[in-house]
Amino acid sequence: MPCTLQIGGINGEAVTGGGLPTQLRVYVRRQGKCDQVEITVRVTQNGPAMFTAMATPDNNGTATAGFIVEPPIFACGSPLWVEARCAAGGECSASAQVSIDCKVPSDGGSGGPNNGNWPWPFPPQLFCPLIGRGFTLALFTGIVTFLTGVAMALPPAIGAGVAIVVAAFGILAVWRHWCAIPYCYFWGAILWVLKRCLLAGAILTLFFVSAATLLCTLAIGFAAGVVTNRLRKAHCGLPRMITPLTQLPLW
Amino acid sequence: MLIVGAVFGAVLSFFFVAGPLVVAMAVALAVSPVLPIIGALTQWQFPVGTIGATISHILFSLIAYVIAALATPVPASGAVAVTPAGGGFPMLWEFFERFARGWLMGMNAVVVLTLPFALPWIFSGLPAVSLLLLATSPLLAIAAIFIAVVNVIPVFAPGVAGNNIYAGILGWTAWISPPTWPATMLGLVVCIVNSITALFGAPVRWVPEFWTGSFMTHGGILYPFWRVPAGYSLGNFYFLDPRIGATTPEFFPPPLGGPTGAFIGLTADGATLHETGHTLNVAAFGAWFTYIGWVHQNFFPTGLNGGPRAYAEVLAEAHLRDSTIPWFPFWAPPVGLAGLTPNAPPTFDTVTVDGLPPGAFLNYSAGASLTLSGASADADGYPAAALIPGSPATGVRWAFSTQPAAAAAAITGATTGTATAVVPRGGDYTLAFASTDGAELPVGGPLSFTAKVVEAVVSVPIVASVNQSFTADGSMSTAGVDFAGAPLPLTFAWSITPPSAVIADATLPTISVTPTETGPHVVTLQVTAAGAAGTSHTASGTVPVS
């Protein structure tokens, strides 16, 4: 899989009473093979580099680098130019102008996606992909559980599957409320789930010789086709069945 | 007439196809659980009812196909001119075509209703599986009614056939639609055989097309290797020749590509759309329809509306809509083209060899390296970029369509916009640049560059004696031929080291050299092609003189 990088954003932390962050944390998403990412921050595209650091992507493909800004000079919302380059294990780079988010864990008050109060324990750059993966995984688990229940004629499993799918949509509600989900990423995640469920359904059909599972599998295949065409119409990339969940773009 | 045809087909099917099939399968199923071996035999030896029903099905499909195929006035390219819905009174031929199409769909829909018996019957050799499936007959019956209804919807609302969601339902339900099985089962076997070859190193690519529930196998060994590459479809499986590029045009030298060779613009990814049209054909009209269509296309390549104008082909082509091929506006592509819009072929952007455009005189000396630069565009981004978003709209290829027999000229990066070619031997070369959007080449075909390459060829004896003359032959030198086919005139300039050796006339193709001392003598020939911008090439041979 070719290496691609995407600038995830900058989160301002340790905000002073005057509303200026004293620490900046830059997030870069990696897909494909890249072992180390060099992150550079500039005030403007052609300005001198303020910070440069090497970062190793975690298991989810997120590379982060933190910088101390002392004295604090950038207000929340200020634009900065961020460059990321794969320094080892691949050849790819990305750059973008991004604004400093200052979403920090709140003291329990009500938050919102567009203000400084952020009720979650992680900044959006980490929370959004995490919750996106949670939804994807829950949906996949729910449908497979449902299919297994149908194949084995086990009503409890069918019920559990339906419950998990409902829960997945609950997670989706959180995801949609707190994160700005790109259209392509959302439907790409759905297609990824459907493709894997199609495979699971085919295996269950053959293993349990279940006509009901066969019909469900065909319905899943049809749904995958509809989502595929939806993505095509929007000129979105089509995720492959073999793409690992950690490589799915979900932020 | 669609409805009349559908009712006619349904009645025929009820009495002569589906009815006898159900009776035959029910008998086999009744016997199987009690006497599995006899059950298996009754299945695999094809009881009379099954044979009779199958023959009837083939015969009725053939008659309906022939009516539709002969009635339809298929143009050389573009859409068949049908009367649009609400567009007035249909033309006479449309009555026949619609009647036959309705007949096929009605007949198919009734055969679909055999599903509750057909699925257990298929497995009657495995009584445990058969019984499990038989136990779910009510569910299968509901599914069968649903599929049958789906099948006949275009009879009452023909425009629905062009809806991509409808096509998705039709394509996916084809997997369990009994009339498709004679094609899909063979497709499964071919898929397995082609896939097995991958274990032995054959390049095979598998790509599911989720829209219509079709499955592509690109590569393997089961393909018509004796003719220009193509694809073929068997139910929900379709197969593409390994010689077709996945995304780039391919060059086929003579004799396969005709007397001068030819590029094929159809790519495997682009062909997906045509083949998914066949998937829908099988789903709507049954497997026998596709076999009859195959015979029509291949055994009547020029007459009787055959070849690419075959009825089954023009229906399937409604997805791809190659601008040079006819198609029937029934199915429709899911993205990219709306209404009756055909595919827009790709176009060339700037294409040069060493900065010179096509038509310029290109002259080189042997061994020269050429810088090839080519770009193309596709106005509608269809089908390649539409089918796989993010992929390039066009694929390109550089190829030597002609070159001297022993040249074996190579191109590095032939499928990229910027490539490098080396012309190793003297003679005439034709360098061609082709582009495809996945379906077809640009209007006018590939761009060609003609290059003349001058090469000095020196032939000298293995050994020579001092004060005895030997011959140095440069007559094998060449710079290609002129427009009349005559060799281009060359000028020769010989020299020798050490210079003490005597050359009779250093401007002749073949010279006599008399060495006056011993030791190695290096004979050098510089050949210059007349009328080729003074391009010259130098070669030398060493003669040990004793």
Image (spheres, coloured by chain):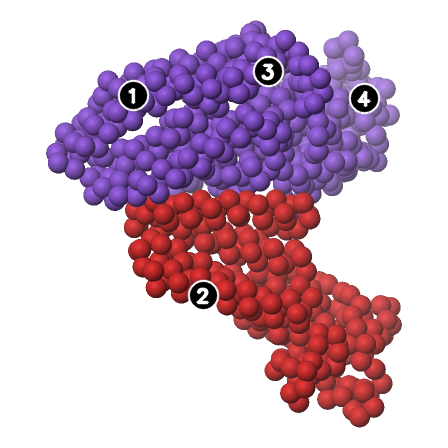
State the quadrant of the C terminus of chain B.
top right
Check if mark 3 and mark 2 are on a common chain.
Answer: no
Give amino acid for label 1: Pro
Discs 3 and 1 carry the same chain letter: yes
Label 2: few (<14), some (14–19) or many (≥20) C-alpha neighbours in 10 Å: some
Residue of label 1 = B20
Which quadrant: the N terminus of chain B? top right
Report the number of numbered marks.
4
Residue under the image location 52 percent in, 17 percent down: B4
Residue B100 rendering spot, x and y as whole percentages: 52, 15
Question: Label 3, label 2: how many angstroms apart (C-alpha)?
Answer: 53 Å
Amino acid at the residue labelled 3:
Arg
Vertical relation: B136 (above or below) A47: above
Q: Residue furthest bottom?
A: A17
Hey, which residue is sitting farthest left in the picture?
Answer: B35
User: Residue B481: x, y in percent?
Assistant: 75, 15
- Which one of the lettered chains is coloured red? A
- In this image, B162 relative to A212: left or right? right
Q: Which mark is residue A163?
A: 2
Question: Is label 2 on the same chain as label 4?
Answer: no
The answer for which chain carries disc 4 is: B
Q: Nearer the viewer, residue A67 or A250?
A: A250
User: Residues under labels 1 and 2: Cα distance?
Assistant: 46 Å
- Which labelled disc corresponds to residue B309? 3
